[in-house]
Each structure stands twice: as structure tokens, then as C-alpha cells.
Image (spheres, grey):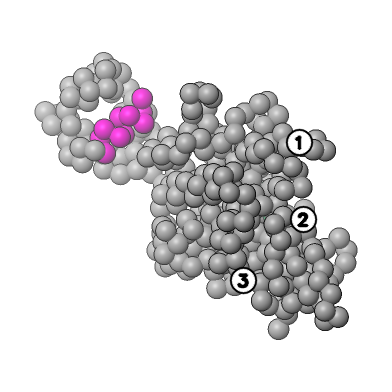
Amino acid sequence: MKEKILDYLNKGHDYLSGDQISKHLGISRQGLWKHIQELKDSGYQIAAVPHLGYRLESCPDRLFALEAARGLNTKFIGTSTKLSADKKIYYFDNLVSTMDSAMQLGLQGAASGTLVLAESQIKGRGRLGRGWFSPKYKGIYLSLILRPKILPSACPILTLMSAVSICEAVKEVIDLDAQIKWPNDVLIYNKKIAGILTEMNAEVDKVNFVVIGIGLNVNNDKKSLIAGATSLKEQQGVEINRVVLLRELLRRIENNYFLLEDKGPGEIINKWRNFTLTLGTRVKVDYQNKHIEGQATDIDADGALLIRKDSGLIQKVSSGDVTACR
Ligand code: BTN
């Protein structure tokens, strides 16, 4: 109901009488008043003037489920469907890690498209056993449950798809050009703004579910950034509306996911190539306690990086850490 009240207030842009709102939404005046108080307690500024009614003055910069879902217009990500009317967005002010909560929800049978959002994480997880610094109200920290009908070996494409979606959303919302360092770091001017961690629950030949974890530095100031990282605010010089960016990101992920389902990995890989920072450069890749150096020439259909060594031999690397060689 709160979502509907906000939508209606938003549409009016001017004062709407309590009577008008209650009638339109089919609730009592008392019920409306209670909802308005709760919205105010959550940080919405709603002016209430006798004889005039209510007017929405401002929304808080919070990733509330209600806010994320407003005008989202996705088919299944964060949106209930006829087939699954279950809750699709879980919001927390603080969590240990959205990955742990999403994994648990996945095991309990949560539907594809279920989203876990947290305003801060105590122990955000990064790739290769690293952490993810998750200061409160500064970034977007999300884990998304997907149930793709693909083999476990094909899952890395979902990480590439997510990286592409982040670049597209950043371009659309704030017109900044982000690039992807293989496999899944998103950078602006060579500094990291986002990372992706993909975990799955699978059998040998069947994926039960995948959890895609995305950490995006949005409004971090210099002091809440680690070395080598940047934020969209730092790059753009202004505070960014996290909710608007989140919604666009979810829409992009859904569109790219449908593209992957319809056309296979080729289209996603082509898009990924447009954003790559890695291909065509000389790199060193550390993987499984080994390292290899050479020219990064391409990625294959599974998202593995192809390196041409100085001997001319092409070697395929499925996961690892890339450093640019000067
Ligand atoms: C990386 O670059 O190493 C991946 C970082 C992924 C961080 C995100 S934040 C939301 C989700 N929850 C976590 O604990 N990790 C991922």
C-alpha cells in the first residue's frame, strides 16, 4: 500500500487531499494517516497541510524494497510474477554479507529474480578470499538469485553479463564510460568502481541456482575507498541517486539475461568486447599459484581469457587475476 501511496503522491506533484487519496486507493482516512506516519518515520518528507492535504517533498536515499521496486518494470528480477507471487526483494540495513543471505534463500527455494539488498555489510566478500569494503549508505551491495538452465561450466558467462550490465547502467544514468578488466572488475580511468562475485549451487550437470553478488562504489568519499578504488561520486563530482542507478542496473541485467537465453553467449561476449580494458594488451595473469604472461587476444564462448604467449602458443585461462604489463 505504501508503494501505491507514494506513486499517487508522486503523480500529483502538488497537494492531494486525504479524501482523494483514500478514495483512489480504497483505504480509510485513518489507514492512510498511519501509512503516511510510517513513511515519514522511514525518512520520506511528506508535507501535511490542513484543507490542502499531503504532498511528497522528498524521498530518502535508501534502497528500501519499496523504492527499488517503484517503476522498476522488470519481468522477474525483483518483481513478483503470476507463477511466483513470493517476496522478491529483501532489504537490510546491515548484514554480514548479502551472499550468505541469498545462498540461504536459494536453498529454501527462492524464485529466480529474488534480490537481497543491504545498506552495509560487516564482512562483504570479494573474489579469491578477499573482502569487500561496504560502508553504510554509500554503495550498492546486492546479491541476485538466478536459476539459469545452463551447465555449471557455462556459468562464468553470467559474470561477464553482469559486468556488461554495470557498464551499460553507469553510461545510461550518469554518462560515464566504465571498462571491464577481465574477468569481472569494472573500472573507470583504471580505478575499480565495482566487483562481481558469482557463486553457485550445482550438481555435476545441473545448476540449481546461481547467486550474483555486485558491489558498486557509488557515493563513497575518498576516505571510504581503498587503494586502487574510486566511486562514481568521485568521478562525477556530484552525489548520485543510488535507487535510480539500482533500478537501471536490474533492468540491464534482466535484458542481458533474456538475450543470453534467446541467443546464447555470443551477443553478450560481443557486448563485453566493447567494454574490455584487457583485450589487445600485454598482461600477466596469476592463477592457481601459477602465472603466465602474454598478449590477451580474446575470450572464448565460456568467457575464458585467451593469452598468446611469446612462444606463439595460445593458452586459455578460466579464472585468475590480471595485471597490465607496461
Ligand atoms: C570482487 O571484486 O572481488 C567481488 C566483490 C563483490 C562484492 C559484493 S557486495 C554484495 C555481495 N555481497 C558480498 O559479500 N559480496 C558481494
Is residue 9 highlighted in magenta?
yes
Q: Residue at x 17, y 22 (%)?
A: 19
Q: Is residue 141 visible?
A: no
Helix, strand or loop for disc 2: helix
Q: Residue 95: x and y, percent?
A: 62, 39
Q: Is mark 3 within 8 Å of ligand 1?
A: no
Q: Amino acid at mark 2?
A: Leu
Pair 3/1: label in front: 1
Cα–Cα gap, marks 3 and 2? 21 Å
Q: Is residue 100 left or right of residue 179?
A: right
Q: Position of residue 151 (x, y in %)?
A: 74, 42
Residue 271 appears in the figure:
yes
Q: Quadrant of the N terminus?
A: top left
Q: Residue at x 27, y 22 (%)?
A: 25
Q: Which of the two residues, 272 or 115, is positioned nearer the viewer here?
A: 272
Write the start and end of the magenta stretch as one range. Answer: 1-10
Q: CA distance from mark 2 to mark 1?
A: 24 Å
| Residue 130 drawn in magenta | no
Residue type at mark 1 is Lys
Q: Is residue 60 left or right of residue 181?
A: left
Farthest residue to the right: give it: 289
Could you give the CA–CA distance between mark 3 and mark 1, rounded to whole angstroms? 32 Å
The residue at 81%/71% (across/down) is 314
Residue at the farthest front position: 263
Disc 3 residue type (three-letter): Leu
In this rendering, the answer to whether 84 lies above or below 14 is: above
Mark 2 or 1, closer to the camera: 1
**Mark with earlier residue (3, 1):** 1
Q: Which residue is mark 1?
A: 206
- Mark 2–mark 1 CB contact (< 8 Å): no
